[in-house]
């Protein structure tokens, strides 16, 4: 089988990778987070966690996607807004 992403633990087919890329659209660099997750799974995870890598990685990516979605919420003018819907302004130095 040919893999689009092949790490030490994580192996994703083209179909699975494309699906995750579409579903987790708020993650800026999916491949970087997959490499990071794969490194954690291969070095620090217990064997039972390694066996369930697909579900645990999907849950991990879902949490990351939600975090990035919250941080990048924008109003109709394209300005970043906080949880209350107020624009976030950055002061100039």
Image: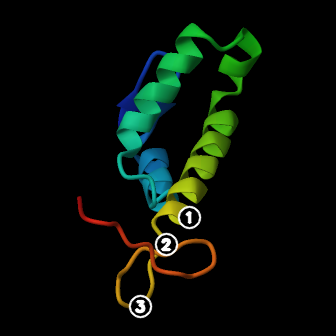
Q: Which residue is at the far left?
A: 93
Q: Residue 41 placed where, x, y %?
A: 58, 18
Hey, which quadrant is residue 61 in on the image? top right
Query: Among all residues in the image, which is located at the extreme bottom?
Result: 76
| Residue 70 badge | 1
Local secondary structure at mark 2: loop
In terms of depth relative to the viewer, which is nearer, 80 or 93? 93
Q: Is residue 7 visible?
A: yes
How many numbered dots are placed on residues in this image?
3
Residue depicted at 67% across the width and 44% down the height: 59
Work out how far the residue at label 3 is from the one at label 1, CA to CA, in angstroms. 16 Å
Instruction: Out of 90 and 22, give the one closest to the viewer.
Output: 90
Dot 3: element? loop
Q: Judging from the image, what secondary structure is the residue with disc 1 in?
A: helix
| Residue bearing the label numbered 3 | 76
Q: Is residue 42 left or right of residue 87?
A: right
10 Å crowding of disc 2: few (<14), some (14-19), many (20+) = some
* Whether residue 78 is situated above or below residue 88 in the rendered picture: below
Mark 1 and mark 2: Cα distance apart in space: 6 Å
In the picture of the structure, the residue carrying the numbered disc 2 is 73
Evaluate if marks 1 and 2 touch, with contact meaning CB atoms under 8 Å apart: yes
Residue at the image point whose x is 53% and y is 81% from the top: 86
Q: Earlier in the sequence, mark 3 or mark 1?
A: 1
What percent of the width, then of the height, locates residue 4?
35, 37
């Amino acid at each position: 089988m040919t893999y689009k992403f092949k790490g030490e633990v994580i192996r994703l087919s083209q179909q699975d990778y494309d699906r995750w890329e579409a579903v987790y659209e708020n993650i800026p660099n999916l491949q970087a987070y997959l490499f990071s997750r794969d490194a954690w799974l291969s070095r620090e995870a217990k064997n039972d966690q390694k066996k369930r890598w697909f579900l645990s990685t999907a849950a991990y990516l879902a949490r990351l996607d939600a975090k990035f979605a919250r941080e990048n919420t924008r109003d109709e003018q394209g300005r970043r807004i906080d949880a209350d819907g107020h624009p976030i302004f950055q002061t100039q130095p």
